[in-house]
Amino acid sequence: MADLEGHLARGLYLFTWAGLALGVGLQVAAFPPRGLALWGYGVFALLFLLAFRQGPRKAPRLLTHALGGYLVFEALRVPESGYLVGFWSPAVYLMAAFGYRMEWALAYGLGWGTLLLGAIFLRQGLSLPWLHLALAQPILLSLALLLARFRELKGQVRFWQEQALTDPLTGLPNRRALEMALRREAARVERGEAAFSLVLLDLDDFKKVNDQKGHEEGDRLLKEVARYLVAHVRQGDLVGRWGGEEFALLLPHTHALQADRLAERLRLGLEALGVSASFGVATYRGDLEDLFRRADRALYRAKEGGKNRVVRATGEDQGSR
């Protein structure tokens, strides 16, 4: 089933590019460009080619502006094709919705929609067709944003339902879930979003709790720590059980210094509960394997340095604590 969906997605992606090429081809055949317009076509052809080479994940960001600019260009170049050009405006909104976060998608969609309407109005004036086109734009943009949001939420629900990704003791996402979430976060960074940080947390001397008070007390302590972490991280952060007495925190849009401060706040809170924990902090730099390794080394240095402390991976912001 997954293979079928993958083939279908690739087919639809290629069909989208074929449709774009045919649409531009029809416009050129009906209204051949001359003079400076030929240079304009050269610029847009280059932008479309660059977007295609970036692949499905990154292409929507560049296409939002390349296609938006092209539609405005055509509306100004050929007045009689203004309303025909307007048929393509939903593609701009969809590219923005799938390429950017909601607030940026809204801003870019409104921007290009307004420019397109302005170009058509400038060349054709106020008319009933223009009013219909103007009324349709906010509706089309809203539907595109809702579709993107629904797709994201549906994907998240399906992700958690189809995978056995929960730690049975604490109810937190397990290591496999965290690794998958980290890969998704890395893909967002590749699309141009801000970097994220990983915090590894290990309870100090946990073996003594099991040996002296029994595994039941150890399990109770793990669940208590899990509840505390979930209750005291920020909205959007992900807390998971990395394994044994070790937890992990995925902190989106967070650089090393911010992550360090959050970890220190959590350390002090756990200390107030009578729990000693060591923390290792690292920020994503383009390689997940390297991220895991640097966070683990920072955690090791926290243990070696006397436990119950936060250590940042070397070379990040102001260095280690």
Image: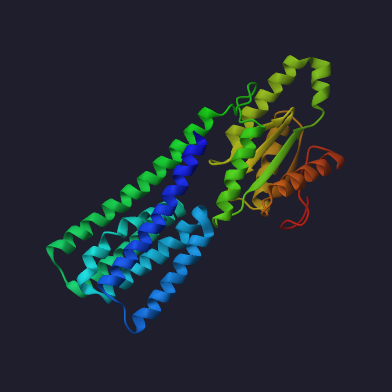
Image position of 294 (left or right of 198):
right
Q: Residue at x 61, y 31 (%)?
A: 173
Q: Is residue 270 above or below residue 23?
A: above
Image position of 233 (left or right of 319):
left
| Residue 269 position in % (x across, y down) | 68, 35
Residue 111 visible? The answer is no
| Residue 69 position in % (x across, y down) | 37, 69
Q: Quadrant of residue 248?
A: top right
| Residue 122 position in % (x across, y down) | 22, 74
Q: Residue at x 53, y 59 (%)?
A: 54
| Residue 55 position in % (x across, y down) | 52, 56
Image position of 165 (left or right of 317):
left
Q: Residue at x 37, y 79 (%)?
A: 38
Residue 294 visible? The answer is yes
Q: Residue at x 58, y 55 (%)?
A: 190
Image coloring type:
rainbow
* Residue sitting at the far left: 128
Q: Is residue 253 above or below residue 22?
A: above
